[in-house]
C-alpha cells in the first residue's frame, strides 16, 4: 500500500479556525422556564420551587461553563488521509483522525465535514487528552486535479445540550484526484490498432503468468494472491495441497501515447464563460416561468435545448479535454496491467512537453496518472515539440505504435516524432474516434493501482500484485 | 435506536416526578392514591412495552382531549362552594390530569421535542407537588417527599445527559438516512478515542452535586422580600385534635388527641461570648398564655386586663449571669382563635383577633430590659413589632404578622434564676382599682353548678384530710405567716395528690364518664385520667375551693437539644399546662370583701382604699410525670437523632423558611463575620467548645461511620466494576451470548485471551469426551462461524438459519441438562 502520497497538501496553507459559542434553542427555553419558576417561587415565597428553579439555572450555567471551556477544541488537529488513489467520479474511503493535543477531555463531540464531495458526520463520545480518534469516511470527487478538503466542524454541547460550541477547522490540506477512469475494451482497442497499423509482435519474449487466459504452461503450488479460479482440483486432490494452472501470456507490446490537450482558449476562460452562459440561461428560464403560465413540456424542452446550444462552444472543448485525459489515463491503467507491457506518455502540454515512461510498476503508472491529473488545456495552434524532441534525442522512444489522443479536429503534425518510421494512430475525441473501444461513463474498473482492493470486471481473473 | 440507559433514565425521571406528585396529593386528597399507583404501573408497563405498541399521533391527541374533557367533568362535579373554595380544589385535582396526560404522551411516537415535552410535564408535576406539599406541610413532615424530590432532580440530570447524547447520535443517524438516499456516504464510525461508554450514574451524581451546590448559592443569593403564599394557600379543613399550644383549654372535647411532632420554635441560648448553651431540657417552661376564667369546662384568659404597649428596643448589654435567648417561632403553628362559644362561633380568647402570643423562658423577670426584641422575617411586618405586655400575667402578645411565617425575638434571661422558677417575683394586687379587683375576683371564681361545686369541695377536703391538713380551719383567724404556710401546704398536698397518686393516669384519650357533670369534676370523681390541661384545671379549681387564687398557664415544657446545631427544638408535643397559685406574703393584709353596689341606688358604697395584697405566684405542676421533653444524651441513637434533626433543621430553616430576614440577618451576618475579628474570636471559642464536648464515644462513632462510608464506597465501586464487566460481556450477539451462557453453567468459560474459535474448539473437545454430549460437539463451532459472519462479515442470518441455530442450541442445552 502506498502511504498517502496524494493526501499531502500541495502547498503549506495557513490553518484557519473559527469558534462560536451560543445557547441552543432548548437552552433558551430552559432558561425561560427556570426563570419563570424562580420568579414565581420568589414572588410567592414558595422556596421549594425557588430551589428547584435555582438548580435548573445552575444546570444551565454549568453547561455553559463546560461548553465555554471547550474553546480548546480549536487546538484539535484534524487529519484526513487517503490510503488509496482517488479517481475522479469514483467513491473512495478516507481516514479521518482527530487528534487532541491538549490536556483536556472533550465529550460528545459531533464531527461534520463540510465538503460537498466528501461529506461526513460522526460522533465522538469521548476524546481523551493526547489521544487520537480515528474513523473512516466515504467520498466521491467529480473533478480531477488538486482538491482542497472542506472545513471540518467540531461541536459539542456536553453534558446537557443547552449550549453549543462550534469550532470550524480549515487546515488547507489537499488531495490529488486522478483522472476519471473509463471503460476500455482492450480487445477492441487492439483491433483498432491493428486496423490502423501493422502491429509487429516479433522478438517479444514469452512471459509465464498464472491465471492468464492463453496457452496452458504447467502446474505449480498455490501462492497467496493467486485466483482460486485456476486451481487444478484433480491434481490438488491427488497431491493433497492446492495446485494452480500456469498459462503463457502472449508477448506484451510497447505503446507510445501522445496526449495533445488543445483548447480553443484557456481553460479558466472557457469555464468562466460557460458559467456565465449557464447563469444567463438559468435566469432566462426563471423569467420565462415567472412571466406567464407554465409552458407545455414540448415547448419547454425546445427552449431548454436552444439555450443549451449557447453553452456548447464552451462546454464541448472542456468535455473533449476531459474525455481525452480520461482516455489517456484509462489506456495507461489498462496497458500497465498487461504483463510485460510498457507505455510511454508524451504530453504536449504547453511550454513544457514531457516524455514519461512507465516501467510497469504501480509507481510508474502513478507518475503518469498524476501528470495527467493536472493537465490544463492549451490554446496554441502550433504545438512546440522542442522539449519532446530533446527528450527523444536523449533517450529514444521505444518501438511500438504511437497513439495520439487529441482534442483537435485534426491531429497535429508530429514532425520529427512521426518521421521515425513509427506507425501513428490518431484518436480525435472530438470526432468520436474512441467510441468503438472506450466508454467515458462509469466504467466497471475498480480497485487500487497497487492491487489491494477488490477485483476488476466481473468474470475477469485477478492479475495479482504485479500490476 | 434508543439506548436502554436513555430510556431507563427518562422513565425513572417521569416515575419519580409522578411519585412526588402522588405523595403530595396523598396528603391533600387521599382518594387519589390508587390513581397514582395505577399511573405508576402504566409508566412501568410502558417502559417494558418499549414502544412496541404506540398510538398514532391523531389518536393520542384525541385521547389527550378526551382526558382533559373527562377531567373537566370530574372537576365540575366534585368542586363546589365559593369561588375561593373552587380555586382551592383546583390544585389538588390538577394532579391526576397531569399524570394521565403524561401516560397519553408516552403512548405516541416520540421525537426529540416529545421528550422535551415529557420532561416539561414531569417538571410541572414536581412544581405542583411542591405547592401541594407546602399546603399540607408534607415537605416538613414527610422525609420521603424530600428524598423523592432529590431523586427526581438526580434522575433529571442523568436523563438529560443521556438525552443530549441521544440527540447527537440521532442527528448522525438522520444525516446517514438522508445521505443513503443519495447512494453515498455513511456516518463515520470511530474506532478509537477512548470508547463511548454512556453517561454513568457516578458521572451524573457528580453533576447533580455540582448543580445542587451552585443551585443553593443562587437560591441563597436571590433577594428575598415577597408575599407569603403559604397563608393564602392554606386550605380550610376540619381541625384535628393534636397536641399543641392553644390559648385556651376546652375540657368538653372527648376525641383523642394525636401526638404532633411539628416543631413550633427553635431556641438558641447564647452567652456574652457568643457560645451556645443548653438549658434544662426537661424542666424548662416556656410561658405563653395565662387563663384565669373558667366557664362551662373551658379555661381562657381574662378579657379585660392591664396591658401596656412596648416598642422594640435596642439589644441591651448583658449583665453577669444573663444570656440571650433567641426564639425562632413559626407563627403559623400557633393557634390564635379558639372555638369557645356554645354557638361554636369563634371567640378569640386574646384581646384582639389580630394578636398572637409569644413564648418566654420562665421565670420571666418583669423588667423592661429583659422583655423581648421582636423582628419579623418580612420587613413589611415591621409595624407588628409593638408588643402588648400584660404585667399581671407576664405574658406578651404581638399583632399577627400578615406576611411572615417566622418571628424572631430575643429575650434577656437570667441563667441563675433558671433553676429557681418555682416562685415568681413579688407582685401585688391593688384591690381598690376595679381592673385589679376584677382580676383578683376572677382568680377565685368557681362558676360551677351547685352539685358539682359541692362534690369538688368535698373531694378537696378529703385530699387535705388525707394529707393531715384540717380543711375546716378559718384562715382569717390565723396570723399572716401561719396563713401563708397553710396555703403552701394545701397547694403542695393537692398537687402531690394529683401527680403522685396511683389513682390518676395521664392519657391523651380524654375519657368522660358522666357527661352531665362538669368535665373537671367528672375527671376528679370518675375518670381520673386525662391530659395536662385536665390536671391543671382540677388543681386550679381545688385551690379556689380553699380560697387560694389560682390560674392556669399554657405554654410548653421541655425541649429537645440538638448538639449538632446547638439549639433547642420545641415541638407541639411539648405543649403543657400548669398552675400558678397566689400565696400572700406574711405581712399582706387580709383581703377585704368586694363592695356590692346598693340595690336601691345602684351606687357602690365609699370606703377607705384597702392596702394592696402582696405575695408571689407559686408554680405547681400537677401532671404525673412532669414534662414530656427528652434529655439530650450522647448515645449512638441520640447522635443519629441529632444528625437527622440537624438535617431537618437545615432543610426547614435554610430552604423551606428561607426569608429576607434569614438572608440579611443570618447569612449576610455570617459573611460579615468572616471579616470581623470579634466574630472570628467567637467562632474560635465555639470550635474550642465543640472540641471540648467531643467525648470519646463521639470520636469512636464518628470513626465507625467514616469506616462504614468508606467500605460502602469501595463496595459500590466494586459492584459498578462488576456491572460494567458483565455489561461488556453481554454485548455479544444473541446466539453466541446464549452459547456462552449455556456453557457457562457447566463451568466452561472463555479465557481472556481466547478467541471465540479457540473457545469453540476447546468446548468441542470437552463435549466430545462424554457420550451424552458428543452428538452436540459441533454446536459451538457452528455458532462461532455464524458469529464471525454476523459480527465481522456484516451477514444477516436468514430465518431458516436462525431457526436451525436455535434448535441446535436447544439440543446442546438439553444434552448438558441430561448429562
Image: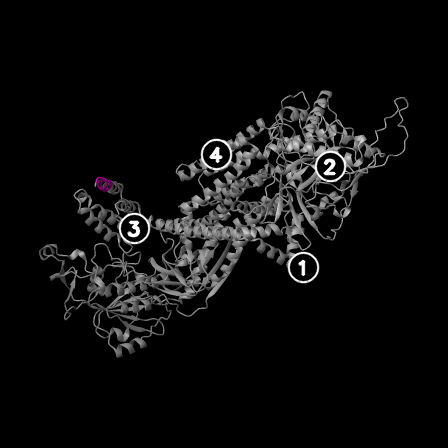
- Number of residues whose C-alpha sits closer than 10 Å to that of mark 1, classed few (under 14), some (14–19) or many (20 or more): few
Q: Which SS class for mark 4?
A: helix
Q: Chain of mark 1?
A: B
- Number of residues whose C-alpha sits closer than 10 Å to that of mark 4, classed few (under 14), some (14–19) or many (20 or more): some
Q: Along the polypeptide, which appears first: circle 1 or circle 3?
A: 1
Q: Which residue is mark 2?
A: B354
Nearest the viewer among A158 and A301 is A158
Q: Which residue is mark 4?
A: B37
Real-space Cα separation, disc 2 to disc 1, in angstroms? 41 Å
Magenta span covers which residues? Answer: B810-818
Seen at 73% across and 33% down, the residue is B551
Q: Which residue is mark 1?
A: B678
Q: Which SS class for mark 2?
A: loop
Q: Which residue is mark 3?
A: B791
**Residues at discs 2 and 3 in contact (Cβ within 8 Å):** no
Q: Along the polypeptide, which appears first: circle 1 or circle 4?
A: 4
Location of the C terminus of chain B by quadrant is: top left
Amino acid at each position: 500500500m502506498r502511504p498517502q502520497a496524494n493526501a499531502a497538501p500541495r502547498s503549506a496553507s495557513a490553518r484557519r479556525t473559527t469558534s462560536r459559542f451560543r445557547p441552543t434553542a432548548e437552552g433558551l427555553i430552559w432558561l425561560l422556564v427556570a426563570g419563570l419558576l424562580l420568579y414565581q417561587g420568589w414572588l410567592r415565597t414558595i422556596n421549594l420551587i425557588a430551589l428547584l428553579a435555582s438548580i435548573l439555572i445552575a444546570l444551565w450555567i454549568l453547561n455553559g461553563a463546560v461548553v465555554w471551556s471547550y474553546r480548546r477544541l480549536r487546538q484539535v488537529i484534524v487529519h484526513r488521509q487517503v490510503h488509496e488513489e482517488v479517481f475522479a467520479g469514483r467513491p473512495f474511503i478516507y481516514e479521518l483522525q482527530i487528534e487532541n493535543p491538549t490536556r483536556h477531555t472533550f465529550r460528545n463531540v459531533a464531527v461534520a465535514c463540510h465538503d460537498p464531495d466528501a461529506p461526513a458526520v460522526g460522533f465522538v463520545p469521548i476524546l481523551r487528552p493526547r489521544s487520537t480518534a480515528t474513523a473512516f469516511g466515504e467520498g466521491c470527487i467529480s473533478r480531477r486535479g488538486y482538491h482542497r478538503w472542506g472545513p471540518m466542524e467540531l461541536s459539542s454541547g456536553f453534558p446537557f445540550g443547552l449550549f453549543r460550541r462550534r469550532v470550524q477547522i480549515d487546515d488547507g490540506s489537499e488531495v490529488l484526484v486522478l483522472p476519471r477512469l473509463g471503460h476500455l475494451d482492450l480487445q477492441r482497442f487492439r483491433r483498432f490498432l491493428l486496423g490502423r497499423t501493422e502491429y509487429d509482435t516479433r522478438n517479444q519474449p514469452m512471459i509465464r503468468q498464472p491465471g492468464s487466459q492463453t496457452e496452458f504452461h504447467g502446474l505449480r503450488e498455490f501462492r497467496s494472491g493467486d485466483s482460486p479460479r485456476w486451481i487444478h482440483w484433480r491434481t490438488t486432490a491427488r497431491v493433497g495441497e492446492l495446485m494452480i494452472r500456469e498459462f503463457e501470456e502472449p508477448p506484451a507490446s510497447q505503446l507510445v501515447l501522445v496526449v495533445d490537450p488543445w483548447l480553443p482558449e484557456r481553460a479558466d476562460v472557457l469555464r468562466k464563460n460557460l458559467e456565465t452562459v449557464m447563469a444567463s440561461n438559468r435566469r432566462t428560464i426563471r423569467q420565462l416561468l415567472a412571466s406567464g403560465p407554465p409552458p407545455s413540456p414540448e415547448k419547454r424542452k425546445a427552449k431548454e435545448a436552444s439555450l443549451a446550444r449557447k453553452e456548447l462552444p464552451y462546454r464541448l472543448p472542456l468535455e473533449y479535454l476531459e474525455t481525452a485525459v480520461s482516455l489517456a489515463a484509462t489506456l495507461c491503467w489498462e496497458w500497465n496491467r498487461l504483463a510485460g507491457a510498457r507505455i510511454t506518455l508524451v504530453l504536449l502540454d504547453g511550454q513544457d512537453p514531457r516524455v514519461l515512461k512507465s516501467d510497469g510498476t504501480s509507481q510508474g503508472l502513478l507518475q503518469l496518472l498524476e501528470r495527467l491529473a493536472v493537465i490544463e488545456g492549451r490554446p496554441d495552434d502550433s504545438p512546440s515539440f522542442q522539449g519532446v524532441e530533446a527528450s527523444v534525442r536523449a533517450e529514444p522512444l521505444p518501438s511500438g505504435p504511437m497513439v495520439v489522443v487529441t482534442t483537435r479536429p485534426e491531429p497535429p503534425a508530429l514532425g520529427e516524432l512521426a518521421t521515425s518510421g513509427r506507425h501513428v494512430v490518431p484518436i480525435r475525441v472530438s470526432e468520436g474516434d474512441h467510441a468503438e473501444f472506450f466508454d467515458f461513463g462509469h466504467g466497471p474498473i475498480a480497485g487500487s493501482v497497487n492491487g489491494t482492493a477488490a477485483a476488476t470486471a466481473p468474470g475477469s481473473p485477478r492479475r495479482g500484485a504485479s500490476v | 435506536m434508543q439506548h436502554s440507559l436513555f430510556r431507563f433514565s427518562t422513565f425513572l425521571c417521569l416515575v419519580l416526578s409522578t411519585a412526588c406528585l402522588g405523595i403530595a396529593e396523598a396528603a391533600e386528597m387521599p382518594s387519589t392514591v390508587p390513581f397514582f399507583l395505577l399511573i405508576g404501573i402504566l409508566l412501568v408497563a410502558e417502559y417494558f412495552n418499549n414502544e412496541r405498541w404506540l398510538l398514532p399521533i391523531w389518536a393520542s391527541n384525541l385521547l389527550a382531549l378526551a382526558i382533559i374533557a373527562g377531567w373537566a367533568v370530574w372537576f365540575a362535579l366534585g368542586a363546589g362552594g365559593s369561588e375561593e373554595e373552587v380555586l382551592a380544589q383546583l390544585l389538588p385535582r390538577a394532579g391526576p390530569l397531569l399524570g394521565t396526560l403524561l401516560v397519553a404522551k408516552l403512548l405516541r411516537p416520540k421525537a426529540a421535542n416529545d421528550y422535551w415535552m415529557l420532561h416539561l410535564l414531569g417538571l410541572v408535576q414536581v412544581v405542583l407537588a411542591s405547592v401541594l406539599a407546602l399546603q399540607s406541610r408534607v415537605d416538613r413532615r414527610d422525609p420521603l417527599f424530600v428524598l423523592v424530590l432529590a431523586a427526581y432532580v438526580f434522575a433529571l440530570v442523568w436523563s438529560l445527559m443521556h438525552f443530549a447524547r441521544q440527540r447527537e447520535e440521532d442527528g448522525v443517524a438522520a444525516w446517514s438516512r438522508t445521505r443513503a438516499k443519495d447512494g453515498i456516504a455513511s456516518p463515520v464510525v470511530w474506532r478509537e478515542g477512548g470508547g463511548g461508554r454512556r453517561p454513568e450514574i457516578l458521572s451524573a451524581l457528580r453533576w447533580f452535586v455540582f448543580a445542587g451546590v451552585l443551585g443553593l448559592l443562587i437560591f441563597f443569593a436571590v433577594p428575598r422580600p415577597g408575599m407569603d403564599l403559604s397563608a393564602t394557600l392554606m386550605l380550610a379543613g376540619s381541625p384535628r385534635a393534636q397536641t399543641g399550644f392553644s390559648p385556651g383549654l376546652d375540657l368538653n372535647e372527648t376525641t383523642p388527641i394525636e401526638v404532633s411532632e411539628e416543631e413550633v420554635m427553635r431556641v438558641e441560648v447564647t452567652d456574652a461570648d457568643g457560645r451556645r448553651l443548653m438549658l434544662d431540657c426537661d424542666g424548662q417552661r416556656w410561658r405563653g398564655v395565662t387563663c384565669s376564667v373558667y366557664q362551662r369546662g373551658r379555661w381562657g384568659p381574662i378579657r379585660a386586663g392591664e396591658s401596656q404597649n412596648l416598642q422594640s428596643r435596642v439589644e441591651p448589654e448583658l449583665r453577669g449571669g444573663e444570656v440571650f435567648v433567641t426564639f425562632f417561632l413559626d407563627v403559623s403553628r400557633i393557634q390564635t382563635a379558639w372555638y369557645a362559644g356554645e354557638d361554636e362561633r369563634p371567640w378569640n380568647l386574646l384581646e384582639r383577633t389580630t394578636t398572637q402570643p409569644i413564648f418566654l423562658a420562665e421565670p420571666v423577670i418583669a423588667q423592661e430590659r429583659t422583655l423581648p426584641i421582636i423582628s419579623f422575617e418580612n420587613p413589611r411586618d415591621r409595624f407588628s413589632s409593638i408588643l402588648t405586655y400584660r404585667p399581671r400575667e407576664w405574658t406578651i402578645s404581638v399583632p399577627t404578622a400578615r406576611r411572615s411565617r417566622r418571628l424572631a425575638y430575643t429575650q434577656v434571661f437570667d441563667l441563675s434564676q433558671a433553676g429557681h422558677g418555682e416562685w415568681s417575683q413579688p407582685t401585688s394586687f391593688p384591690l381598690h382599682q376595679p381592673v385589679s379587683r376584677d382580676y383578683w375576683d376572677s382568680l377565685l371564681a368557681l362558676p360551677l353548678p351547685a352539685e358539682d361545686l359541692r362534690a369538688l369541695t368535698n373531694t378537696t377536703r378529703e385530699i387535705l384530710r388525707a394529707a393531715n391538713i384540717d380543711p375546716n380551719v378559718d384562715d382569717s383567724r390565723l396570723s399572716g405567716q401561719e396563713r401563708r404556710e397553710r396555703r403552701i401546704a394545701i397547694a403542695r398536698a393537692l398537687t402531690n395528690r394529683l401527680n403522685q397518686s396511683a389513682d390518676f393516669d395521664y392519657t391523651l384519650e380524654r375519657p368522660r364518664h358522666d357527661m352531665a357533670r362538669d368535665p373537671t369534676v367528672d375527671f376528679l370523681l370518675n375518670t381520673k385520667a386525662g391530659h395536662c390541661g385536665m390536671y391543671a384545671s382540677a388543681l386550679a379549681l381545688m385551690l379556689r375551693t380553699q380560697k387560694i387564687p389560682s390560674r392556669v398557664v399554657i405554654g410548653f415544657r421541655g425541649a429537645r437539644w440538638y448538639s449538632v446545631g446547638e439549639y433547642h427544638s420545641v415541638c407541639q408535643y411539648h405543649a403543657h399546662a400548669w398552675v400558678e397559685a397566689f400565696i400572700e406574703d406574711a405581712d399582706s393584709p387580709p383581703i377585704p370583701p368586694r363592695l356590692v353596689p346598693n340595690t336601691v341606688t345602684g351606687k357602690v358604697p365609699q370606703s377607705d382604699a384597702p392596702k394592696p395584697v402582696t405575695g408571689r405566684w407559686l408554680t405547681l405542676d400537677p401532671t404525673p410525670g412532669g414534662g414530656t421533653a427528652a434529655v439530650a444524651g450522647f448515645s449512638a441513637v441520640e447522635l443519629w437523632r441529632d444528625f437527622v434533626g440537624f438535617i431537618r433543621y437545615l432543610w426547614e430553616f435554610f430552604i423551606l423558611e428561607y426569608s429576607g430576614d434569614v438572608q440579611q440577618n443570618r447569612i449576610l451576618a455570617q459573611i460579615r463575620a468572616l471579616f470581623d475579628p470579634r466574630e472570628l474570636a467567637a467562632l474560635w471559642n465555639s470550635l474550642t467548645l465543640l472540641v471540648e464536648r467531643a467525648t470519646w464515644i463521639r470520636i469512636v462513632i464518628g470513626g465507625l461511620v467514616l469506616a462504614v462510608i468508606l467500605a460502602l464506597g469501595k463496595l459500590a465501586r466494586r459492584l459498578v466494576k462488576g456491572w460494567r464487566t458483565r455489561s461488556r460481556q453481554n454485548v455479544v450477539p444473541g446466539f453466541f451470548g446464549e452459547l456462552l451462557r449455556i456453557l457457562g453453567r457447566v463451568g466452561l468459560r472463555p479465557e481472556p485471551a481466547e478467541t471465540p474459535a479457540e473457545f469453540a474448539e476447546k468446548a468441542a473437545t470437552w463435549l466430545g469426551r462424554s457420550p451424552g454430549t458428543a452428538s452436540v460437539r459441533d454446536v459451538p463451532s457452528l455458532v462461532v462461524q455464524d458469529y464471525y459472519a454476523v459480527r465481522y462479515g456484516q451477514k444477516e442470518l436468514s430465518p431458516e438459519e436462525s431457526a436451525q441455530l436455535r434448535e441446535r442450541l436447544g439440543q446442546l442445552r438439553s444434552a448438558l441438562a441430561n448429562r
